[in-house]
Image: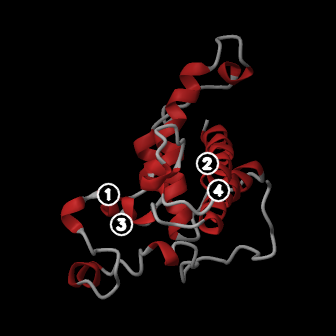
Amino acid sequence: MLHTALVLLADQAYDDAHRLGDQFLPDAGSTTWEVFDRLPPLTWTADHRWRRRMARAFDDLAADLARGKWPEPTCTAEEMALHLAIEDAPTYLEDRPQTDAHHTLPEHGDDYSWDGCSDLLFQDHDVLMLFDSKLGGIEDPQDPTNQSMGMGDLRAAAWFAPFGSHSVRDPRRGFRR
């Protein structure tokens, strides 16, 4: 389910990026965006290149799963991508017909424990604080709250910088679309 959610979110993000181009999200005047209006408001002024890189973040995590690896976020963009995928994944289970091969797999007590997924796959949930309007400015590494929590740089321009504790993805990997 998580792989399905990541692939579909990547497709939706590529579509949104194509339609938006370099327009600021609030100026684009559509209520039919699939992905970018679900991101924190500080990202709404991002350009086309940033949005394509965000789409690739979904693809990178989906590729991890396709290779049989855990989807381990290597940057803030991938953290947000994984949060959205975990949020969307339950709907894809509900959409599967009872005759789907997925339903023939052996059941496990932890199946579909999306909260458990969230606890297992993230070091922290700092990126989600960007949705809280009362915490304006927390994305800046110079912000006192950011510094006291050791959050790092969560400004949109830094979303693709690799975390120090993770391997770096190949910067020449290109884009699926």
Please say if the residues under marks 1 and 2 sit with CB atoms less than 8 Å apart.
no
Q: Nearer the viewer, mark 2 or mark 4?
A: 2
On the image, the x and y values in percent for residue 49 come to 65, 68
Estimate the spatial distance between the alpha carbons at disc 2 and disc 3, rounded to whole Å: 25 Å
Q: Quadrant of the N terminus?
A: top right
Q: Quadrant of the C terminus?
A: bottom right
Considering the numbered disc 3 on the image, is that residue within a helix, a strand or a loop?
helix
Residue 16 is marked as 2
Residue that appears at 46% across and 46% down: 29
**Image check: 41 left or right of 157?**
left
In this rendering, the answer to whether 155 lies above or below 45 is below
Residue at the far left in the pictured view: 134
Q: Quadrant of residue 99?
A: top right
Kind of residue indicated by mark 1:
Phe
Q: Which residue is mark 4?
A: 55
Q: Which residue is mark 1?
A: 131
Kind of residue indicated by mark 4:
Ala
Kind of residue indicated by mark 2:
Asp
Q: Nearer the viewer, mark 3 or mark 4?
A: 4
Give whichever of discs 2 and 4 has the lower sequence position.
Answer: 2
Give whichever of discs 2 and 3 has the lower sequence position.
Answer: 2
Estimate the spatial distance between the alpha carbons at disc 3 and disc 1, rounded to whole Å: 10 Å
Give whichever of discs 3 and 4 has the lower sequence position.
Answer: 4
Residue that appears at 54% across and 21% down: 94
Q: Which residue is mark 3?
A: 126
Q: Nearer the viewer, mark 3 or mark 1?
A: 1
Residue that appears at 71% across and 73% down: 169
Q: Residues within 10 Å of mark 3 (few under 14, many from 20)?
A: some
Estimate the spatial distance between the alpha carbons at disc 2 and disc 4, rounded to whole Å: 9 Å
Residue that appears at 50% across and 44% down: 86
In this rendering, the answer to whether 161 lies above or below 36 is below
Please say if the residues under marks 1 and 4 sit with CB atoms less than 8 Å apart.
no
